[in-house]
Image: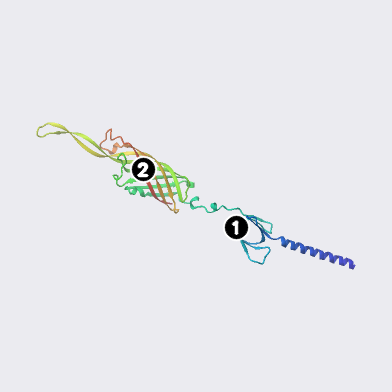
Amino acid sequence: MNEITNMKNSTLQFSLSLLIILFLSVLGFSQDQIFLRSGEKIEGKVLEVGTDVIKYKSKTNPEGPIYSKNISDLLLINYASGTTEIYELQNPTSSTKSKNDSNIDIGNHSIAINAATLLFQQLEIDYQYLFPKGIVGISFPLAYAMNPGVTRSNNGHALLWSAGSDLKFFTNGQKSASFYLGFGFDVGQTERTISHSEELMQNDPFTGQSYTSIIYLTEEVNNNFYSLSGLIGVELNPTKLLSVDIGGRVSGRSHFLDNQYNNYYDGSSQRGGLDLIVRPLMRLRVRF
């Protein structure tokens, strides 16, 4: 009987010892494993994972100081729970994009005034609409000459007014600096000074004879025109509401005489001619 009792006690002691050994073994292997990109392996306990660094305690000195490593130095972490967290190498150029690399959210509608034409006493305003995605825009410029005689083309034409539409293509979308190319069509009216001569029959009061005299006259002639234009420029968008449009347009302008507004015209005056016009753009734009 005593032998049976001693055998049971021995079995119980062996089982308890085995459990203790297994428990201690689990504790010994229940460590987080940190693998660095340099190839180094660190065993310890991860305490905190931040956006830039992780904090941990070393396996060899669990009661010692808290260590830290940069996230950029990590390859992966094997946690004691069995989960693994892998850290991809971040590209500094992609994480620190310049402001002009990303599209900005601006209003599709805008109204602008061309400050450059004010120097020539011409008032030019413009309405622009941006289609979704900000790649294509359409604008409708209107121009009025407050003093037509200030500037004249190579054919002597001075702008009175014009109206048209432009189609613009923004090569890089809507960013802090948006480059564009485009073309436009407009119509309008110009003023041109022409000179001509007329024969006048006069009577001599002393001799009673008639004779012909020639007089020279000048007249302001109005000409209608249509033109095709090419545009190039850049829109600077410092804010969502304001932008500056800097560029230029080159226009081929064809004139034809408007008989309704002219008292005198002949074959020579009807030749309106073709003008090549270069106009600077410096529009101050308000978006909404």
The residue located at (15%, 34%) in the rendering is 202
Please, what secondary structure does the residue beneath circle 2 have? strand
The residue located at (36%, 43%) in the rendering is 278
Label ID, residue 273: none
Q: Is residue 235 above or below residue 270?
A: below
Residue 42 placement: quadrant: bottom right
Callout 1: few (<14), some (14-19), or many (20+) C-alpha neighbours within 10 Å?
Answer: some
The residue located at (37%, 46%) in the rendering is 280
Q: Is residue 249 left or right of residue 54?
A: left
Quadrant in which the N terminus is drawn = bottom right
Residue 256 placement: quadrant: top left
Image location of residue 9, percent across then percent down: 84, 66
- Between marks 2 and 1 in the image, the one whose residue lies nearer the viewer: 1
Given the image, on which type of amino acid does mark 1 rest? Ile
Q: Looking at the image, do the residues carrying marks 2 and 1 touch, with CB atoms under 8 Å apart?
A: no
Image location of residue 6, percent across then percent down: 87, 67
Kindly give the residue lying farthest to the left in the view shown. Answer: 206
Image location of residue 30, percent across then percent down: 70, 60
Q: Is residue 13 left or right of residue 241?
A: right
Q: Is residue 255 above or below residue 128?
A: above
Q: Is residue 76 left or right of residue 103?
A: right
The residue located at (79%, 64%) in the rendering is 17
Given the image, on which type of amino acid does mark 2 rest? Val
Q: Which residue is mark 1?
A: 71
Color encoding of the figure: rainbow
Please, what secondary structure does the residue beneath circle 1 have? helix
Foreground: 148 or 165?
148
Label ID, residue 278: 2
Image location of residue 43, percent across then percent down: 67, 60
Q: Separation of disc 2 and disc 1 at Cα?
A: 57 Å
Q: Is residue 26 above or below residue 114?
A: below
